[in-house]
Amino acid sequence: MPVALLALALSAFAIGTTEFVIMGLLPDVAGDLQVSIPSAGWLISGYALGVAIGAPIMALLTAKLPRKKTLILLMIIFIIGNVLCALAYTYNLLMMARVITALCHGAFFGIGAVVASSLVAPGRQASAVALMFTGLTLANVLGVPLGTWFGQLFGWRATFWGVAIIGVLAFIALIVSLPTNKEEKPVHLASEISALA
């Protein structure tokens, strides 16, 4: 099993955790930022909107980049977004930070799945993609409850600092382990737009 698959799974774990952990922290966030819990709940919708909008936009913006560079760039956006979440001192800033964090989500999983399948022999491609998405499953089973517990113990901002640190570890792992594929076929924007249509 290539180490790069573990790097992709770690990245998926970080992304999945930051997406869902806010649910367990809503009362803490609402109290700290002086908004109602239903208003704080819009932070979940804001992230979902960022994913929906960000996936096609990021796919188009990064279409000419090599996949390794694209995944690394998306992790940088993810780290910056989580740091901004941890530093946000108003509800509006936190919403903006959540949307920024979400921009990388859909594109990372789409490109990551392609990269994961390219790391193994043809007969093991489905297993490679499944291994990467195991990170997302573990985010729901372990990351979210641990992140919620951590945030309730040390403050909700600590959870986002923690996820940002996991993002940095994933970023380093991607740089070190992902191979540079010299034979990648360039993506044509016209075909991407027609597929979107």
Image: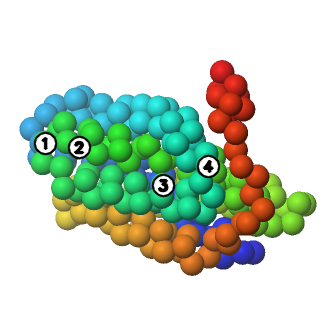
Kind of residue at disc 3: Leu
Q: Secondary structure at mark 1?
A: loop
Give residue 190's position: percent from left, percent from top.
Answer: 68, 31
Q: Are marks 2 and 1 in contact (CB under 8 Å)?
A: yes
Residue 94: tell me if it is visible: yes
Image side of residue 78 versus residue 24, left or right: right
Q: Nearer the viewer, residue 58 or 168?
A: 58
The reply to whether residue 44 is visible in this rendering is no
Alpha carbon distance from label 2 to label 1: 6 Å
Residue bearing mark 4:
64
Residue 74 badge:
3
User: What crowding class fits label 2: few (fewer than 14 Cα within 10 Å), some (14-19), or many (20 or more)?
Assistant: many
State which quadrant residue 148 falls in. bottom left
The amino acid pointed to by label 4 is Lys
Reading the chain from its start, which is encountered first: label 4 or label 3?
Answer: 4
Label 2: element kind: helix
Chain-order first, disc 3 or disc 1: 3
Q: Is residue 89 left or right of residue 4?
A: left
Residue 81: percent from left, percent from top:
33, 52
Residue behind mark 2: 94
Sequence-earlier tag: 3 or 2: 3
In the shown orientation, is residue 35 left or right of residue 180?
A: left
Q: Residue at x 25, y 53 (%)?
A: 84
Count neighbours of disc 4 (C-alpha within 10 A) and say few if under 14, some if 14 to 19, many if 20 or more.
some
Q: Amino acid at mark 1?
A: Thr
Tag shown at residue 90: 1
Dot 1 or dot 4: first in sequence order is: 4
Foreground disc of the pair 1, 4:
4
Q: Check disc 2 and give the amino acid type.
A: Leu
